[in-house]
Image (cartoon, rainbow, N blue to C red):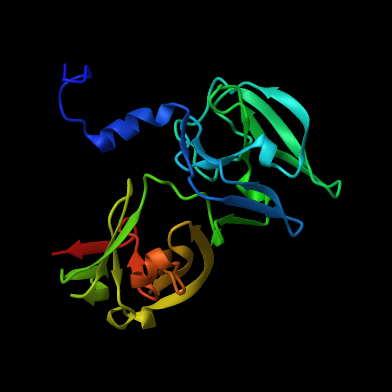
């Protein structure tokens, strides 16, 4: 035992966080959070909590019920299904809860109803807060900054590191990109990604895709595909043309999926 009565031995924090993913967890947001619908703030609170339901890899905001400018209506007690996916991602609907509680709709002052947009867990630490469905609202703000994608995770960050490593991207014998001035992007819990200046990419071998994704830290990504002979590789690379400030160093650069092409480093 340690001097403070806890178990002796250093703790691997990454492993510790993975151990907790099956638990209901929360952290204080420590900032003003607002959710807008119909041009007005339906939620406006300085006591918002960031909540991870068991198995959820992305957090949700939980706002004190007293700070909602809306009425909780049509409550239905909720018990999780016996079998849920081991990991719940943003692709899994808000209604797929993994803890007991009550599912509610929100009646706005206009009379409009946001069906199933709130969930109040039974857990005493959260029973005075309502988890809110991100997609039910038109806009979210932390202080006066617009937040996209999902709430910011206080235990996650991105680092953009200029590098002089030699990075080559190829498919078969064709080199799609080669550089000695990449930017290494490290994001907590995710694999490293290498972003390559556009001048070092064979843009003549790429065509824009209609695909788009949103990252809470980097912004909206545009995608690129390639066609070499009869072989088409869809969405082989992506770029953030106008990234959020955390991703500013990778603006306009391209990153390739290393499971669709070969990415050699070193």
Q: Position of residue 53 (x, y in %)?
A: 51, 32
Q: Is residue 175 left or right of residue 166?
A: right
| Residue visible at 58% across and 50% down in the picture | 33
Along the line of sight, which residue is nearer the eye, 18 or 43? 43
Quarter of the image where the N terminus is located? top left
| Residue visible at 45% across and 67% down in the picture | 244
Does residue 237 appear in this view?
no
Q: Is residue 120 above or below residue 138?
A: above
What residue occupies the far left of the structure in this picture? 266
Numbered disc total: 0
Q: Position of residue 216 (x, y in %)?
A: 48, 56
Q: Is residue 97 above or below residue 35?
A: above
Q: Is residue 98 above or below residue 209?
A: above
Q: Is residue 60 left or right of residue 176?
A: right
Q: Position of residue 251 (x, y in %)?
A: 39, 73
Q: Position of residue 132 (x, y in %)?
A: 63, 41
Q: Is residue 168 above or below residue 74?
A: below
Does residue 174 appear in this view?
yes
Quarter of the image where the C terminus is located? bottom left
Residue 168 image-quadrant placement: bottom left
Q: Is residue 106 left or right of residue 127?
A: right
| Residue visible at 37% across and 78% down in the picture | 205
| Residue visible at 58% across and 31% down in the picture | 97
């Amino acid at each position: 035992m340690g001097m403070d009565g806890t178990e002796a031995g250093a703790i691997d924090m990454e492993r510790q966080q993975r151990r907790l993913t099956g638990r209901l967890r929360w952290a204080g947001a420590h900032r003003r959070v607002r959710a807008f619908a119909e041009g007005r703030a339906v939620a406006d609170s300085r006591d918002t909590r960031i909540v991870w339901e068991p198995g959820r890899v992305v957090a949700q905001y939980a706002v004190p019920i007293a700070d909602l400018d809306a009425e909780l209506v049509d409550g239905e007690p909720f018990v999780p299904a016996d079998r849920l996916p081991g990991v719940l991602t943003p692709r899994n609907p808000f209604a797929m809860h993994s803890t007991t509680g009550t599912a509610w709709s929100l009646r706005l002052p206009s009379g409009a109803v946001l069906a199933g947009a709130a969930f109040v867990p039974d857990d005493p630490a959260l029973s005075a807060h309502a988890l809110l469905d991100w997609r039910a609202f038109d806009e979210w703000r932390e202080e006066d900054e617009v937040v996209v994608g999902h709430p910011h995770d206080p235990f996650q960050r991105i680092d953009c590191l200029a590098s002089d490593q030699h990075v080559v991207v190829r498919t078969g014998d064709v080199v799609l990109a080669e550089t000695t001035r990449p930017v290494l992007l490290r994001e907590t819990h995710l694999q490293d990604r290498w972003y390559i200046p556009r001048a070092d990419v064979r843009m003549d071998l790429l065509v824009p895709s209609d695909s788009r994704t949103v990252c809470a830290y980097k912004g909206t990504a545009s995608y690129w595909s390639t066609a070499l002979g009869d072989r088409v590789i869809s969405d082989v690379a992506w770029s953030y043309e106008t990234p959020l400030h955390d991703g500013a160093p990778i603006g306009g650069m391209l990153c390739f999926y290393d499971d669709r092409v070969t990415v050699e480093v070193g």
